[in-house]
Every structure is written in C-alpha cells, then in structure tokens.
Image: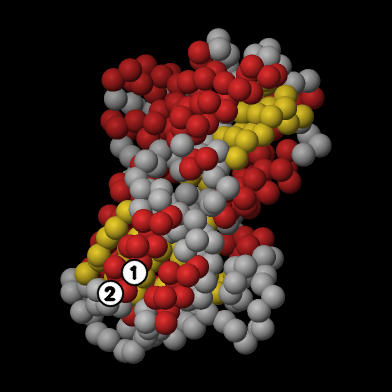
Amino acid sequence: MRRAAVAIAAGAMAVSLAACGSAKESGDKADSTGSAKKGDDIKVGLLLPENATARYEKFDRVLIEKKVKELTNGKGEVVYANAKQDASTQNQQVDTMVTNKVDVLIVDAVDSKAIAGSVKKAKDAGIPVVAYDRLAEGPIDAYTSFDNVTVGKTQGEALLKALGDKAKDGQIVMMNGSSTDPNAAQFKQGAHSVLDGKVKIGREYDTKEWKPENANSNMEGAISALGKDKIVGVYSANDGMAGGIITALKAAGIADIPVTGQDAELAGVQRIVTGEQYMSVYKPYPQEADVAAEMAVALAQGKSLDSIAKDKVDSPTTKAVPSVLVPVVSLTKDNIKDTVIKDGIYTVNEICAGKYKAACDKIGLE
C-alpha cells in the first residue's frame, strides 16, 4: 500500500495525534490485554457511522468482515450496524451489541464525545472497544486511523501548488467537515498550518454532517458574499462535499479553479480525470481495515496488542491508547494508475466508463 515517492512515514505521523493528551493519571490507561481468552469462535460487533459516503459499505465493512474470517479460520462472526449519521442511534446500537454479548466492538463514532458513555458501558460489561478511523472518547482499548493532521497538510500543500501565483491575488473558501467529528478538526488544523499566511481565506465553514447538499449551500453563500471573480480555489475536506461544491461553482459559471478532496471516491477520481477536482487524499482502506480486524480478534481472544500497535495516542479521556496510524497519499491525475488502480480499489473500466473515456484517453489512463 505504501508508495515510496508519496507515502508519509507512519512513525512521523504519530507525533501529531499523540499531542492531544488528557488530564487523567498516567496509570489510567486503556487495557490492551483484552477479555477472557477465547478461541476462533468469536463475535465482533462492527458499528459504522453512515452510508452516504461510499467507503463505509463498499470498503470498510467488506474488508473487516473478510479479515475477521481469515484470522479466525472462518469461525468468527461480524455483527454489523450502521448509524446513518445519528449519534443516538449509534448509542442504541452499542447497547444492543452489549445485550447480545459480542466479544469485542469496532466503533467508528458518529460523534466522538456522545459515544463515550456507551464505550464505558461496553467496557463495564467486559467488552473491549477498538476505535476505528475516528478517535472515540471513553475507555477505548485500541485505535487505528490515518494521521488526520497530515491529511489536512497534504490537502493544503496540494491546493497551494495548484494555485501557484494566484494564491497572492485571490481568496479561497474552506469547507471543513462536521464539528462533531474529531477527524474534521484535525484535517482543519493541518490545512491551516499550511494555508495560513500563504493565501487569504475569504469564507470558512464547518459543514453539518459532512453532507454534500450542505456544502453546496455553503458554497452558494460564499460565492454570493465574495463574488465569483474573487475565488481562486476551494479547500474541501472530502470528495462528497467537493461534489456539492463543484455543482455550486458550475451554477455560478466558475470553472478551472482547484478543489481538494479526500477518500478517493469513484466520483471524486472521475472528477480528477476531467479536471473538475484537482486532488483527493487516498487512504489505503485495506490496511486500516486489516489492522482494526487484527486488533479486535486479538482483544477478543485475550491476546496482547504489542506486536500489532507500535504507537500510542492520547484521546481527551484516555492516555496512551495502543494505536496504528496508516500513511496517506496525495492523489492527482498523475498517479491514479499507481494508487487506486494498482491497489485494486477500482479498475480502469470503472473509472473511464461512458462519458469519462475521452478524458481518460487524454491523460493516458487506458
């Protein structure tokens, strides 16, 4: 999964996330020893946050289920639930998993703070919890994600590169993710560390629930406030929102300005091929999903995480959580072949279907 020219060393990435420590005593750590020892016949609860973003159903769920089966000789069971962007629903789903006595939970939190009580409830019931992709609060036992500050830096650096001299003259719009998602705050932090002082930020939004339609409305407001001739680029925290942003730009007659993204969704990659979107951040989901499954199976079987998790991350409530941080890649039209195609995420035929064939041919993607 790692590309030597573009991947970021995992060791370097541990620093930024480890900075957000808590005031708890250093001895008050997540327990990485797992529950009572079990064999391969385990039940893994998997809770994902929403299904509007393509990755969760297409990649994360499928990959985790496959890896759990592989690690348990086909005997392990994954019990799945999707919260559809509702924190209360996800808390109820945790309660159900606890009642049904799963052996371990993998939780990608809708709201990192709101999930804390449910994480404690699971822990009190003897069920270890792996925080997946987002750093959930509460007594979690393990965590795997990407270095989210580095994701924001990668987006910001790409945007500045695309802007060139235009960065001095115009303004950009920043479309951040949901304020309830701790990852969104870290993406924003990383982006600001690169963009501040280099380009004027005309308008900035935290986009409710990451929804493309909310990003679209925000972008319409930014265009109205700033004027369409003053905007030279858009920082978008993910591909779904980039789609809504680009729709608003087109409606206003704005073309040929760089827009960032994240997740390497198929629609985002296709927009990169056509030039409507400048870049996305490719996050190797297979690696992240495999790590989450390895952590969950080890915890359910009462094994140590020492051989899996080499890093430690502090959440606002728990110190030194055993963690694995996966490298990310800046995806542009120049490295589509070496990333999502080479890794088997998409085929050329999927990307270049129908109206996208001519654009693919133009950039040599055939």
Of residues 231 and 215, the one drawn nearer to the viewer in this rendering: 215
- The circle drawn on residue 61 is none
Residue 71 on image: x %, y %? 28, 73
Location of residue 1 (image quadrant): bottom left
Instruction: Return the residue at label 1.
Output: 95
In the image, what residue type sits under mark 1?
Asp
Dot 1 crowding, Cα within 10 Å, few <14, some 14–19, many 20+: some
Q: Residue at x 48, y 27 (%)?
A: 244
Looking at the picture, does residue 8 appear above or below residue 279? below
- The circle drawn on residue 99 is 2
Q: Secondary structure at mark 2?
A: helix
Of residues 9 and 304, the one drawn nearer to the viewer in this rendering: 304
Quadrant in which the C terminus appears? top left
Q: Secondary structure at mark 1?
A: helix
Dot 2 crowding, Cα within 10 Å, few <14, some 14–19, many 20+: few
In the image, what residue type sits under mark 2?
Thr
Residue 218 on image: x %, y %? 57, 28
155 horizontally vs 76: left or right = right
Colour basis: secondary structure
Would you say the residues marked 1 and 2 are in contact, meaning their CB atoms lie under 8 Å apart?
A: yes
Q: Specify whether residue 50 is in view.
A: yes
Residue 13 on image: x %, y %? 62, 60
Q: Residue at x 60, y 40 (%)?
A: 206
Q: Residue at x 57, y 82 (%)?
A: 29
Looking at the picture, does residue 65 appear above or below residue 350? below
